[in-house]
Amino acid sequence: MDIVLEVTDTFIADHIYAWLHPKPSALYEFPNTTDSEPFSSWVYKPASEFLTLVPSKAAYASAWDRDNPIRQFISLYFITWLFGLAVYFIVAALSYQFIFDKRTFNHPRFLKNQVRLEIVQANRAMPVMALLTAPIFWLEVNGWGKLYDTTEQGPGLWYNFAQFPIFLLFTDFCIYWIHRYEHHPLVYKFLHKPHHKWIMPTPFASHAFHPLDGYAQSLPYHIFPFIFPLQKMAYVALFVFVNLWSVMIHDGEFVTDNPIINGAACHSLHHSRFEVNYGQFFTGFDRLGGTYRRPEPWMFKREENMSQKRWNSEAKAVDSLVKEIEGGESRTYEDRGSKKTQ
C-alpha cells in the first residue's frame, strides 16, 4: 500500500497538507537567503524501484511530512475508503448496466427499492471498514509485513507466480471459516443478516454488509502479507481483484457450471439457501466441510432461470428457510402491480 500512498501524496495529499497544516516560517531570516522554502529533514525514497515520482515543493511545505504517522494514518483511511468506493461504484455500475439481467426486478423476492438500499448499506459500511483497516495498512507501510519490491528481495522468481494461488487458497480457507461462523445463530442476526437481506442480489449488494461483517471477511487479505511474502505491485493488483470478484459473484450472470470455481451461480445459492457455499473463490473447502451445493442445471438456462414458474417455486423454498433461520420475514418486497423504479 506504500506505492498507492506515494502516488496519492505526489498528486493530491502533499498539496492538501501543505495548505491545511503548513510548516511554520523560520524564526530567523538571514540577509543573503534567497530560498524562501521551509526547511525539511524529510528525504524522498521511492516506495518501489519500478516507480519514481519526483516530489513537488508541496512535499516539503507541511509541518507533517510524509513520514508523520498521523498524516499517514489519515491518508490511508481516505485512500481505503475513497479508492474502495470508486472501485465499488465503477465496477458495480458497469456490471449492473451491461451484465445484470433487469428481469430480476420482477422476481417475487426482489425487495422494494432494493438497488437503492444496497447502495445505502454499502456506503454506511465502507467508512467504518476503512477506519478498521487503516491501522493494518499503516503497519504494512512502516515495514511490519513481508511485502517486497524486487525479485531479489523475495523468495525467488518462482514465487512471483506462486504467490497468487497461495494468496487465493489461504484467503479462501480463512473466509470459508469466518463466513461459516457468521451463520451461527448467535452471530448471524447481529452481524451477517444485513447482507442476507438480498435474496436476489444485484452487483451493488457486493459491498452491502454490516461494517464488522465486511471487515471480518476482509481480514484474511490483510493478514496474508504478515505471514507470507507478497510483492508490492501484486498486493495492489490483488486488492483490486478481490473487489472485482466480490461484484462478479453478485451479478447474477451464471456463465459456466464450474466444479472448482465458486462463481455467481454458487454464490446465488448462498443467498437463497443461506447455509451452503461459504467459500469466496473455490468450492473445495465447502466440499471438505460438507456445505457445498452444486448449482442446478436449469440455473444455466437463462429463460428457465428467469421464468415466473421457476421463481414461484424458488420463493417457496426461500420462505421456508427464512422462517427456519431468521424466525420470520422482515423484508419488504416489491409490489408486483406497481411500476419498478430502481
Image (tube, grey):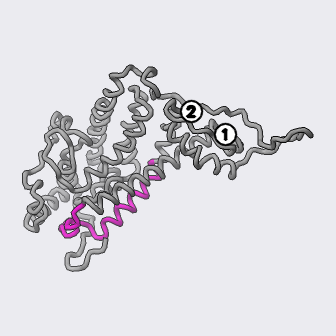
- Where residue 220 sits: x, y (%)? 36, 36
Residue at image x 55%, y 31%? 142
Q: Which residues are magenta?
A: 100-129
Question: Is residue 184 covered in magenta?
Answer: no
Q: CA distance from mark 1 to mark 2?
A: 15 Å
- Residue 245 shows up from this direction: yes
Q: Is residue 11 above or below residue 319?
A: above
Most common SS among magenta residues: helix
Residue at image x 84%, y 41%? 34
Q: Which residue is the site of mark 1?
A: 65
Q: Secondary structure at mark 1?
A: loop
Disc with the residue nearer the chain's start (1 vs 2): 2
Residue at image x 20%, y 44%? 277
Q: Residues within 10 Å of mark 1 (few under 14, many from 20)?
A: many
Q: Is residue 338 above or below residue 78?
A: below
- Residue 198 shows up from this direction: no
Q: Which residue is the site of mark 2?
A: 46
